Image (spheres, rainbow, N blue to C red):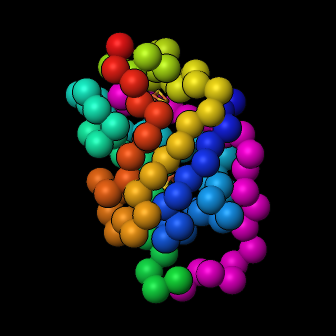
Amino acid sequence: MTKLDCTVTNCLHNADNCCCKQAIIVDGHSAHDCSETCCGSFDENKEGAFKNVFKTPESRLEIDCEAVNCIYNEGRHCQAEHINVSGDGASRSEHTQCATFKER
Ligand code: SF4
Ligand code: SF4
């Protein structure tokens, strides 16, 4: 399980810069750089519509990851102790990225 901080505050699943999902998918099969990865579990919170919905940030979660060129990827699963997902202001998953990606 990986600790995750996420600055994508307009994602439906974000609360207090953490993710409220128990598992996410990171995309970026042919990524050679952070900017070529993205959080495939991103859902836009249009106009803050769900702002008041009770959400519980998960301190650690399972991360399935397609970015096989990353040193932390083992069998399409993230083995990093801690990752950062960024993309403040994102309206599509392509606008987000795993900032911890490191090429093998
Ligand atoms: S962008 Fe991804 S990691 Fe961040 S809160 Fe949304 S689903 Fe979770
Ligand atoms: S650190 Fe690497 S393996 Fe982990 S989610 Fe980010 S890109 Fe995928």
Residue found 62% across the figure and 59% down from its top = 17
| Rendered location of residue 80, percent (x, y) | 58, 25
Left or right: residue 47 compared with residue 33 = right
Residue 65 in which image quadrant: top left
Magenta span includes 17? no
The segment highlighted magenta reads: 49-67
- In the figure, 39 relative to 75: above or below? below
| Rendered location of residue 28, percent (x, y) | 31, 35
Residue found 34% across the figure and 37% down from its top = 34
| Rendered location of residue 71, percent (x, y) | 43, 16
Magenta span includes 64? yes
| Rendered location of residue 9, percent (x, y) | 53, 67
- In the figure, 20 relative to 71: above or below? below
Left or right: residue 22 compared with residue 35 = right
Q: Is residue 83 visible?
A: yes
Left or right: residue 13 compared with residue 46 = right
Residue found 47% across the figure and 34% down from its top = 100
Q: Is residue 43 visible?
A: no
| In the foreground, 56 or 86 | 86
| In the foreground, 80 or 1 | 80
Residue 94 in which image quadrant: bottom left
Residue found 39% across the figure and 69% down from its top = 89
- In the figure, 86 relative to 80: above or below? below
- In the figure, 77 relative to 45: above or below? above
Magenta stretch: helix, strand or loop mostly: loop
Quadrant in which the C terminus appears: top left
| In the foreground, 63 or 102 | 102
